Image (cartoon, grey):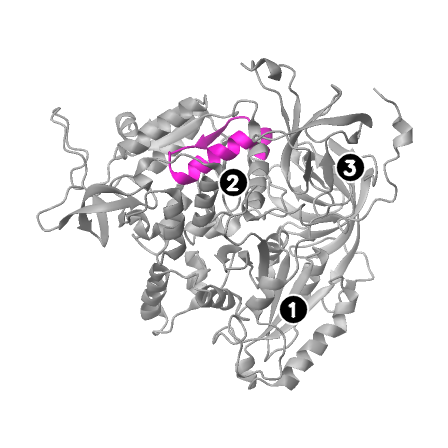
Amino acid sequence: MSSYHLDHLQYLETEAIHVLREVAASFERPAILFSGGKDSICILRLAEKAFRPSEIPMPFLNVETGHEFPELIDFRDRRAKELGAKLIVRTVDDAFAKGLATPTPGQVSRNQLQIPVLLGAIEEFRFDCCIGGARRDEEKARAKERFFSFRDAFGQWDPKNQRPEIWNLYNARVNPGENMRVFPLSNWTEMDVWEYIQREKLEVPTIYFSHTRECFRRGGQWLPVPPPHATNGQPDVYAGARPTAKEPLKTMVCRVRTIADMISTGMIDSPASTVDDIIREVAAARITERGTRADDKASEAAMEDRKKAGYF
Amino acid sequence: MPHSQHPIELLRFNTCGSVDDGKSTLIGRLLYDSKSIMEDQMEALERSADITGGGQVNLANLTDGLRAEREQGITIDVAYRYFATPRRKFIVADTPGHVQYTRNMVTGASTANLSIVLVDARLGVIEQSRRHTYIASLLRIPHLIVAINKMDLMDWSEARFTEIRHQFESFLPRLDIKDVKFIPISALNGDNVVERSGHTPWYEGPTLLGHLESVHIASDWNLQGLRFPVQWVNRPNNPTDKTLHDFRGLSGQISGGIVKVGQKILVLPSGQRSTVKEIWTCDGAVPEAFCPQSVTLQLEHAIDCSRGDMIAGTEELPGVASEFEAHVVWMHQRPLVPGKKYFLKHTANNCRAVVTALESKVSFDTLENETEPPAQLALNDIGRIRLKTAKPLIFDGYRTNRLTGSFILTEEGTNHTVAAGMLEGPSELYKPEYTDFAI
């Protein structure tokens, strides 16, 4: 019987493919949230496996804060083109312009502001389902997520009243205006993602690999120094996110372990320059992946609160 | 596919027991002693210990991820945790103890290879222990560990351990669990969880983790009788590759058995026959595939076949019926009332269903069916029902195949998932001679 046996990555893969096909069969207007990050790179590979030789039957959606790493944006655009997919980008700045969102006084990070932009895009395109690369091992509120996570007409998650999810029988029923968030990588760990990238020989953006970068110390993290303020007469989008005189600067040999935008992503000291190096580093890591995410440190329930409000 | 140097087998287990039996503490202990807790998680635990716990680190806070859970010190919803040892990878579903959250226990247990039922050594077997063991048996989880916890509070008494074991053994024969292991532990102090305890020289079995690492799970999938529920029809629009012009793939996850190129198959319920022409995967065609792989089949003949249909081998045929007997776990505040219509989901099939009769309800005192048919099934009740579907289903008994023998019911309008159901085996198998025609 031993030849009829799946190893852990093959098991996780077949589970995720089943979930993706269930979305394609159950929803009229699904979308894939694609940021160019490592988890959504795996989602795209799984979507190829689920739907080829047909086209991937859903567009890609990305919400930009305006503080993105340029490497990530380039990679995102190129990958979508290679796959022949339609890429929809909506930005926090658009939402300001349309009056859908208001800047929070004194708050530099636009992490929270992604929520109204995402909900706005769902409404604009009448998406009834958004596929995301979130994993349960990332964060303890996410550990409570279903594969098919129901959101009401306001995009809200009600963690105390979730639909029971039994066997592989996903309840995909939503009423008009309601929405489903689907997480095919629910059971994957950070290590599984890297091992899958290794096995499938997937390309990832260069910022995951060791490089030299100017960083500054803030809130226990080494944050990247933002690009210089363009002299175009516009206000500096990085105002408040630039190092002050009191914050020490350092030129680091570093990489990212998890990517938000430039304001929320801590760089880690690392010489890892290949996927094999990264796997060795993850195996030996003594802090969690999201330990380098400034957006999670606001409080013990930071993720739970954002998810309740519609965060992905 | 080449195997990496990493652990290759995945074991899914859930922990259940009553409130305060120490489930979350046990998982915290497993993570902590297997060095799966990271420094920032430990710092967060220590921070909350200083604020709310009088300085004592509470390992339960690792899994109780919702604010309401931390406030009340209980687990509300299933929390999933992941850890690995050099021998295996584990997915843990920490499922709630409160009776009111039985539905979440069913959720966590439905995908498990193994269940850990925790018993407080001071209390012995209580209704919740029987309920959880019964659910593990009903869901046909192949392996059970009874972890008798808080043995430190009973001075590590072998007599007490044996007494509780006998309490279990008095009702286990009425259930359907083949592999049961009893382990004396203290989750709080770590005895016999990862490290062998010095307090139990009388116990010769493995530690809890030792058992999790070595229990034989390779045969937990059903490899008898091909079952392939068609999930999605794969027809490329305007393919640039000319060889794909006639591509018509049937995509799905194999729910039982093995499929081979050249194999004769039946498409059910229509009964059309064909042969497997190709097993297509994104990485190239393969000569065979097996449960639970996700693949795309091409058949020799262009026959009508779409989502909801079942492809089966010509041997070991499934049942076909539109009237069923089943066990259900009721999961909603609004009780199950006979005569009400629900949406039923079974494999890739959605259809309307009506509950035609409520036959019996399980009593958790005796683990037997109550003699009187109940008027309704309330939240967390388990009962035996009859139901009728608007179209025939191709199925197996849940005992034979967990994937083709299970269904859920959802309520029209609210779309709540209201029941998990397990079908009794078919009284009659599909008879191919009725539709015995070749194309």
Determine which residue is flagged by label 1.
B129
Closer-to-camera residue (B363/B156): B156
Left or right side of B257 for A159: left
Residue located farthest toward the right when viewing the structure as drawn? B433
- Mark 3 chain: B
Determine which residue is flagged by label 2.
A184
Compared to residue A220, the image places residue A309 above or below, namely: above
Closer-to-camera residue (A101/A137): A137
Callout 3: SS:
strand
Residue B268 % position (x, y): 78, 31
Residue located farthest toward the left when viewing the structure as drawn? A245
Q: Is residue A108 visible?
A: no
Q: Residue at x 76, y 29 (%)?
A: B262
Q: CA distance from mark 2 to mark 3?
A: 27 Å
User: Magenta stretch: dominant SS?
Assistant: helix
Callout 2: SS:
loop
Task: Please give the range of residues in magenta.
Answer: A22-49
Q: Residue at x 32, y 70 (%)?
A: B50
Determine which residue is flagged by label 3.
B394
Residue B297 % position (x, y): 68, 29
Please check whether the numbered discs 1 and 3 fall on a single chain. Answer: yes
Q: CA distance from mark 1 to mark 2?
A: 33 Å
* Residue A108 image-quadrant placement: top left
* Residue B433 image-quadrant placement: top right
Left or right side of B60 for B136: right
**The disc labelled 1 sits on which kind of residue?**
Ser
